[in-house]
Image (tube, coloured by chain):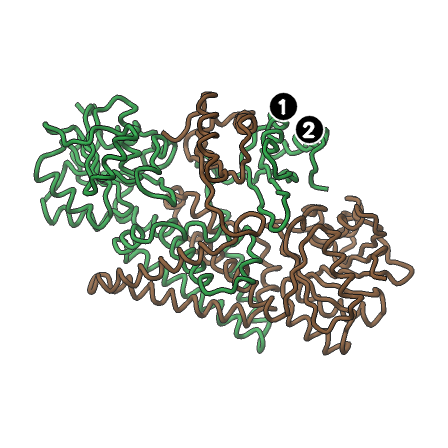
Chain colours: A brown, B green
Amino acid sequence: MSEISSALIVGTGLIGTSVALALRGDGVVVHLTDRDPKAVRRAADLGAGDPSLPAEQVDLAVVAVAPSATAAVVSGLLAGNVGATVVDTAGVKADILRDVRATVGDAVHFVGTHPMAGRERSGPGAARADLFEGRPWVVVPDRVDPNSLARAEELVRRCGGVVVHLDAATHDAAVALVSHVPQVAATLVAARLAEGEDGALALTGQGLRDVTRVAASDADLWVDVLTANAVPVGRILTELRADIDHVIAALAEVAHDPDWGRTALREVLLRGNSGRARLPGKHGGRPTAYALVPVVLPDQPGELARLFAAAGEAGVNIEDVSIEHSPGQPVGLVELSVAPGAEHTLSAALAERGWQLHS
Amino acid sequence: MSEISSALIVGTGLIGTSVALALRGDGVVVHLTDRDPKAVRRAADLGAGDPSLPAEQVDLAVVAVAPSATAAVVSGLLAGNVGATVVDTAGVKADILRDVRATVGDAVHFVGTHPMAGRERSGPGAARADLFEGRPWVVVPDRVDPNSLARAEELVRRCGGVVVHLDAATHDAAVALVSHVPQVAATLVAARLAEGEDGALALTGQGLRDVTRVAASDADLWVDVLTANAVPVGRILTELRADIDHVIAALAEVAHDPDWGRTALREVLLRGNSGRARLPGKHGGRPTAYALVPVVLPDQPGELARLFAAAGEAGVNIEDVSIEHSPGQPVGLVELSVAPGAEHTLSAALAERGWQLHS
């Protein structure tokens, strides 16, 4: 019944091509289409599927176009009876559901979904079959025919994702908080740098690099996302602006009433500590305080290999790695994150092999 | 003349203990003091120096206490003629210079400095001799006796840092831009999470983790830093708030004048792209667009070692590495950054050895 044996991918960008690669690798007959013929050709060249429209109705149509075009494309597919089930993958849900229902009525064969995976790069060339491996993939089950819901969930599983049921409004509020507002904040910090002096930028450390990493993301995609989730994002940004006003007021007050200023700043900083501590750790579990083992790394081929080989020989699993970029000098600092307790084994093993550790 | 053979470290936290470890490792006689006797003992246990005050004047006194206490401690050392040269390490410079001069006059033997190194953790236990290796270390040369300036620069070199001359106001404006405002922004985004629902936080991706990483930093230290640099930070935050107002207005306008709203959002996002692109890359050079090679990594000991060994055998230098945390599934995705061009060699070598790459 719900088995997917054929699919049409509409939109062969990063998400659509990655879905196509995953389904094709799992034995599904995949057709590809995109308003840009070059994008279809590139996706087909990557082995993502057949660059021609299906002759018969497919089991599943996956819409992976810009959020602003999604409702129209979904409505057209439903009206044309192109797919038995139509799924979208846009990063916002309520607006699209509303527009689709306004156009074609109940739309019980349409399932709104959102794979929580992405990259700063876009286009079919950035796609990969494992993009969704282990990632949450939101499925909105409201008013959906059971067979179509089963197909949508099968899609998620066959792409390696983890189904998360949320209603559209809850989804939109959640992504506003954990994705859209952080994107705006990173963008605004980066925007200040556009006018900064070179001398100031030379003092850049890892903190600024981390805060602004997502500010490199595709502007047009984000215009679409923010526009389609304008109300939840605007609400959280307004709360955030109240905090900024508070910080600005506290800084202005420092010269006159330092105690009040300091207390106000401290309250905000502690709230930031609390919020940060709530982020889930690796594998979606509770945050784990990893133990860190810092190692000095000569900047030449093979050094990381030697380092990880030593860790492997010690039987220690490296949970995470960060490399500190050192301006002006060809030496790196690597921080290895390991399970609490394992840092002693690892440090001893590395020191024994001549690695320079935390003094 | 300017050779440092003895030093007193005042404040054995992260910075002071790291300086002590570096100087001691380089043959300097190091004395340690801190208002907290336990912190001195821990630093001495780590091999950072002698936990007693020097009997004679030292060549160099390094003040590494909280920014709010720095001017008083520096003034006391100068008044007591404790060090031939007194250096501070606080993250703000103009306020401290002004307060020291107000207390002890010209203070030509005092050199304001700021090592651009730090961690989210604090205390002597987080210290390491190589903390400053290759990092910029700002030295403020205004109205300083040449011999004292030479000693301050010798300190930087012996700790492995890179001397950057800036006047106090330029330094303070620069760190407001590249460090203090990003800290506030990260804190404010994280503060929003303090009230978020668990379900929303489960959708967290790497972007949010990056944006909020520094929000875990010590609140009391940051109260001091922000207070002491209140004017430059307030100025940039006020500019940033104007951009937030603009974004909030654009989001509110989407329902009525979508074209204006979209244009306004796009302008801000593009400005963020430009600012981000100006960040210096590894080793302080111009940003390099590394090529990325994504690899699927089974989550068990030794896999990273095998991966890097394979890269080493292929003769490819890994410039950076990031591990994507996959919620709900024990598989990781590793992105290896390599020099442009080298990705082909590396991909081929890895595929040959059975690694699962970008499809």
Q: Which residue is drawn at the image coordinates 45% and 32% (left, top)?
A: A332
Q: Secondary structure at mark 1?
A: helix
Point out residue B207 in the picture as x, y percentages from the top left corner. 53, 52
A333 to the left or right of A151: left
Point out residue B250 in the picture as x, y percentages from the top left corner. 52, 70
State the residue in front, B171 or A84: A84
| Residue type marked 2 | Ala
Counting residues from the start of the chain, the first of labels 1 and 2 encountered is 1
Residue matched to label 1 = B313
| Residue type marked 1 | Glu
Residue matched to label 2 = B349
Chain of the residue where label 1 is placed in the rendered structure: B
Where, quadrant-wise, is the N terminus of chain A in this rendering?
bottom right
Point out residue B78 in the picture as x, y percentages from the top left corner. 11, 39
A100 to the left or right of B314: right
Mark 1 touching mark 2, by CB under 8 A? yes
- Residue A304 is labelled as none
- Residue B247 in sight in this render: yes
A140 to the left or right of B174: right
* Pointer 1 local density, CA inside 10 Å: few below 14, some 14–19, many at least 20: some
Q: Which residue is drawn at the image coordinates 43% and 37% (left, top)?
A: B284
